[in-house]
Amino acid sequence: MDWDKLRVFHAVAEAGSFTHAGETLNLSQSAVSRQISGLEERLRVPLFHRHARGLILTEQGEILYRTTREIFSKLAMTEAMLAEGREKPKGPLKITTTVAFGSTWLTPNIKSFIDAYPEIAVTLLVDDNELDLSMREADVAIRMAPPRQPDLIQRHLMNIHFHLYAAPAYLEQFGEPKTAAELGKHRLIIYGERSQLPFPDANWLLHLTRRESGVATLPALTVNNYYAIYRACLTGIGIAALPDYMVRDDTELKQVLPEVEGPQVPAYFVYPEELRNSKRITVLREFLLQNVANQQF
């Protein structure tokens, strides 16, 4: 397949019209149309349905678009890496992590990284859904589970510890449990549905309570996000299992039953194989490893 025609096809698929693609490529609408017609003749399949309101990819066009999108994404990555190899770390760096970790630990700690590398433009995407690193939805991820995508490099960062916490207002109203068995008399805030759990035993507090108290306790509140659980706990709704890093410096929450600890959850630094030699990735990895080594999670 002719490379120039593929480049034009990719631009048209992205833009959805010959006119807009021509503006991007600095070509006339007729020149773009001829390139697409030539590619369709070469492949002997239609790539677009032509409508008055624009262009829609055919099934064959969708297949070709997925391939060209991956090719151009990797070319852009390669171009950035070649430029980066000649200079000190600079350029965009898109980091994705969970809402809880991103909001309560990474955001407050990222300032020293930005100060050290002012020419790196950091974008932080907090999302409990896994973004596709291979499709460059982000450059690097900090995840609470090993990656499921192939061709990703992972580095263990730390193990996150969980304990039980409650607001003083809640404990004043309902009392403080002295044993795990007494949790059956208390309001609990838990994570959510089994299919949505961020790690296998995220609802360990509910399971512990039912096992120790012998009571089929119903949660007072179910929330599918740890930052939201933390905020709910602050209001005095009930007792919650929270990661220690989230509440370490919080004087508004009190640890309940300190001897009770939840499962340790490993956190990983994850990035695509293509970025193995990226200076931006390297300095971020070293920054994180140094910072997590100095703190208790």
Image (cartoon, grey):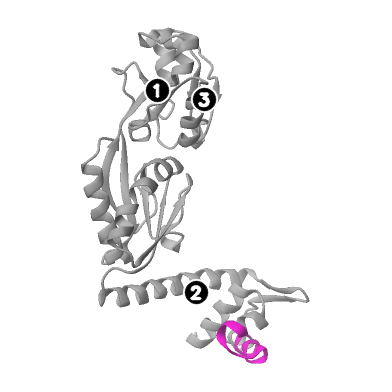
Residue 143 x/y as whole percent: 37, 46
What amino acid is found at the position of numbered circle 1 in the picture? Answer: Tyr
- Along the polypeptide, which appears first: circle 2 or circle 1? 2
Pointer 1: what residue? 165
Pointer 3: what residue? 235
Name the front one of labels 2 and 3.
Answer: 3
Residue, x 32% and y 18% (percent of image)?
260
Residue, x 25% and y 35% (percent of image)?
296
The answer to whether residue 34 is magenta is yes
Q: Badge 3 local density, few (<14 within 10 Å), some, or many (20+)? A: some
Label 3: element kind: loop
Name the front one of labels 3 and 1.
Answer: 3
Q: Quadrant of residue 34?
A: bottom right
| CA–CA distance in space, label 3 to label 1 | 12 Å
Query: Is 41 drawn above or below residue 56 in the view shown?
Result: below
| CA–CA distance in space, label 2 to label 1 | 50 Å
Q: Which mark is residue 68?
A: 2
Query: Is 99 drawn above or below residue 253 in the view shown?
Result: below
